[in-house]
Amino acid sequence: MDYENEYVIELINFLPLDIEDGKEFKFIAYHEKNIRKSLANQLYQSAYISCHMIFMYIIYSYVLRIRDKDLKKFTDLVLCLGDDNKKEWITSNSPFIFSNYKEASILNFLFLLGVEKDHINEYKSIIKYRNNILHATGEVMNNTLNEFNNKLKQLIKCLEHISLKTENETCYWLYTQFLNEYGRSDILLKEEEYESYINKNLIKKHHLSLFDMKKIAKIEYSEFVGFIYKKKFKLLVKYINKKYPKIIQETHIILD
């Protein structure tokens, strides 16, 4: 997205690249439009609220990825919360399945990624701050661009920390799982078919963001030498290069 504010750009880079048409797409589009209009009119509190909505959508997407990585642990934690219509949490692929449950409680799922309790409590304070500014207290807490930027940097710092936890435990695992499946001898794709396969079975399925694609592009090619999917790894890099050429330039991938 063509934003002038660098922190909004950073936040947007954490959004899943392939968002479903319909409810999810309209939700993100609405808040992106509101951010643009609010910043143009110096309505920083309104812009922050929309940024927070996008932030929580990203958090929900991370939680779904935790489920993909370890369904048993995820299911056990869901059962601890009580079985009140949470069965869809196991099967649905929409981040909105968590919307009827307390946001702060959803953050507890980040424990399964190894996020420390102190950090989870810090993230919960972000939600508390958002709740406070939505109450009729007579206060406007984001009066200046500097205040808005500082609060936005707090959201980004949170997402960066979670992302570090997902890099090995989740993102790398999903990536190698995809290559294991993609490299099976019974999946014989023509080169022109690989793009839709990659998009459906890696990017869309696991809600990968531009930030995630940068991490994937940094995985050492040498780790996969000798695997049966060596050629298909090259096709994946070719896909990244075609769709997101700046990533390849930044990571300097070299394929022999």
Image: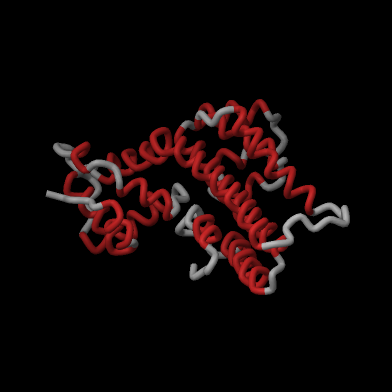
In front of the other: 102 or 125: 125
Does residue 51 appear to the left or right of 61 in the view shown? Answer: right
Q: Is residue 127 above or below residue 146?
A: above
The answer to whether any part of residue 148 appears in the image is: yes
How is colour applied across the structure in the image?
secondary structure
The image position of residue 233, as x and y in percent, is 23, 48
Give percent across and percent down for residue 41.
69, 73
Could you tell me which residue is drawn at 88 percent across and 57 percent down? 138
Relative to residue 5, is residue 224 depicted above or below?
A: above
Compared to residue 37, the image places residue 94 above or below, namely above
Q: In the rendered image of this protein, does residue 51 appear above or below residue 122?
A: below
Considering depth in this image, is 213 or 117 the residue closer to the camera? 117
In the image, what residue occupies the spot 30% across and 60% down?
A: 195
Residue found at x 37% / y 51%:
213
**Whole-percent x, y for residue 63 in the image:** 55, 40
Farthest residue toward the left?
A: 256
Residue 7 image-quadrant placement: bottom right
Residue found at x 67% / y 56%: 147
Does 118 sit left or right of 205 as displayed? right
How many numbered dots are placed on residues in this image? 0
Look at the image and tell me whether residue 194 can be seen: no
Residue 146 x/y as whole percent: 64, 58
Task: Judge by depth and name the residue closer to the eye, 61 or 34.
Answer: 34
Residue 6 horizontal side relative to residue 39, left or right: left
**With 73 as the anchor, is 103 left or right in this view?**
right
Q: In the figure, residue 42 lies in which quadrant? A: bottom right
